[in-house]
Image (cartoon, helix red, strand yellow):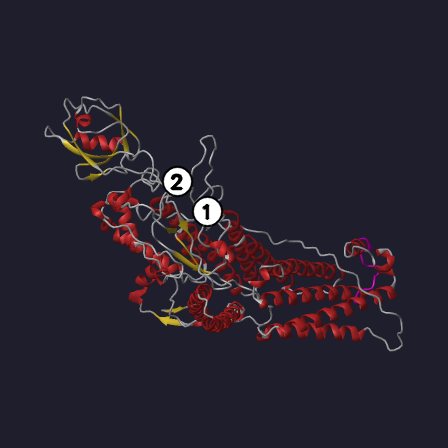
Amino acid sequence: MAIVLDHGTSWVIPAASRPLLLCLYSTTGCNPLAQTGRSKLQNKRATLNQQIIKQMRMRAGAENLLRATTNNKVRELVALELSYVNSNLQLLTEQLEGLNSSVEVYQNVQESASIPMIPLGLKETKEVDFSVPFKDFILEHYSEDGSNFEDEIADLMDLRQACRTPSRSEAGIELLATYYSHLSLIESRFFSPSGQMGIFFTWYDSFTGMPVCQQNISLEKASLLFNMGALYTQIGTRCDHQTRVGLENAITAFQKAAGVLTHLKETFTHTPSYDMSPAMLSMLVRLLLAQAQECLYEKTALPGIRNEFLTLVRMAQESAKVADTYEQVHQSMIQTPIKDNVPMFWSSMAQVKISHYRSLAHYFVGIALLDHQLRLSDDEDKQEKALSQLYDMMPGGCAPLDLLRNKEERRQIGKAHFRRAIMGHEEALRAHNLCRHLRKLDVLREILQASHKRTLAKLDENNSEDEFTDYMDAPDIVSKTEQKAEIEMPMSIKVKVKDFFHKLGPLSVFSAKQRWTAPRTVRLYPGGRDLGFMLKGDGPVQVLSLDPLCAAAVSCSSEGDYIVGVKDTDCKWLDVSEVMKLLKDSDETGVDIRVVSMMEGSPPMPNKSATYSGGLSKTYSMICLAFDNSDKVPKNRKVTKKTSFLNWGTKGKSKSVSTLSLPTADYSATLPFNKQRAIFPNSYNDPALY
């Protein structure tokens, strides 16, 4: 059995190992060590990210020293070193731009006659160790032994590790969606709004390589959505554009990618990573819809373009529609600050496609006017209607029917369209030659040159030596399409998953938002089979109508307590009938039950918090998120707690993005077994953050 990996690499697997292989690939991503084109690109990206971090730390140190010292000699040396570091950063950024411009790696290996598409690269991330923080939280918050959940924590970490290298297929999308669905459960289980877990999520900007480090799990969820959209673009780029099925799959993939990024923009706002900012995401959605529209055009032209008047006019308007969509994309790309983050290759590719498809539109109109004179067998009404919808204003001010019947007028206007098409093809070739990354795409150059030569030949056929009339300008063509690319929300963003920490109990009750007492053992002596209280609920059951003289009340149980265990049986998921059956099975010696009580109130928010953003602009550093109660405020004045503009999370909710807890009081006495509270680094230059 041979297994073919990305880009043709194959392994021969023995038949006995097939079940193990299927299980392995269902829970992991693709092999990160496989020497495929895409894996090499991702490895280079990860290496560049680490080098960028190193240079940024050196730059931060040099800038701090430059501000601190007054010695002129030292300042000169530091300034020289700072210029050297900035030069290195510029070179690394250009190398990263080159990786984002390596679209040929993602194209179909059998593709040889289609213009390349632009995919998105996956965001890189650092490894995260959940084991210690989760075990401590389980012990402190749920009063259970964290070592009993080692397998569950390991499964979660394996799933996250696999998501760093997802396969370029629907299985890869499902893998990311599975982890994304687990994150909602993990957030409810462990991430309390009143405290921090001490887990740092580090993700790198897809375009600049700048790291963003936060304790807020929303960064993890947003970055995962971005990678899901990016993976859809890679799937769409990989499809075979020479078959109808391949084009339909590409259209679906690009539309779903646009849907995922739209969901990201609407759900997570004010993200600290610029590649997920609303402006950048809006531009990316336009780009993906433009590529989907281009695939729709290719799908229309795939069977061949019939040399008929109405067909040529329709294809001209379809081409103009593709050009218009890329014009909108290009206008978004050249806006500040998007143009400083988007690779120049992308902007140049958009310019090439604008000129190319607009030239094709003029070419089709020229063919329709020159090669198809109006005959008695033709439908005048249909041609007149098609021609009237082709222009905003008819050339020369003549009526559409007069233009159709006037052979010389058709000839002059058709040649004008050919001349404008030639100018557009030359502009596309010029833009192609100006970008060094575009010059590497031989397929693109061949397509542009062939289109240019074809238009030149057609113009030469219709030129006459004795023609000295003034040339006229061809009017713009009104864009129109029979099928417009639309945003498609994939159903696979969230999938049904089994909670890794199911043993902790129902999530609606046992979550990070609610505080509980440690389980208490209550000894019951059912006299006359009467327990002295009532139960309700479907897991866990709750104590109601407690008789103050019964054994449960004497043992310090109270109304509202939840029964979490009877004898040696865990009852968190048992309903009333099941719990009553366990209680009735007891004898005269009694039965032990374990109960927990909900605690009133929640621990106070930390007075200070900060966000580490790896050298981003100062607007992302050291934001105070809480009101200091020590400030004197008049009693009649209402104080509103101000939140940082970095607050981001699910839409419609107010969540803190504090990522670095700076404790102002000693809480160690409240931890079990005198456990020392973790001390977090207080400087974004501290290497412990990495």
Q: Is residue 28 left or right of residue 456?
A: left
- Viewed as shown, does residue 690 lie left or right of 437? left
The residue shown at (71%, 75%) is 453
Q: Quadrant of the N terminus?
A: bottom left
Q: Say which residue appears at 63% left-offset and 53% top-offset.
A: 484
Secondary structure mostly taken by the magenta-highlighted segment of the chain? loop
Residue neighbourhood size for the residue with mark 1, other residues' Cα within 10 Å, grouped as few (<14), some (14–19), many (≥20):
many
> For the residues marked 2 and 1, what is the alpha-carbon distance in whole angstroms?
29 Å
Give the magenta-colored segment's residue range. Answer: 370-381
**Residue of label 1:** 649
Whether residue 615 sits left or right of residue 132 in the image: it is: right
152 or 200, which lies in front?
200
In the displayed structure, 353 sits above or below 556; it is: below
Q: Position of residue 261 (x, y in %)?
A: 52, 53
- Image quarter of residue 377: bottom right
Front-most of residues 531 and 10: 531
Residue 62 among those drawn in magenta: no
Labelled disc at residue 458: none
Amino acid type of disc 1?
Gly
The kind of residue tagged 2 is Ser
Picture disc at residue 630: 2
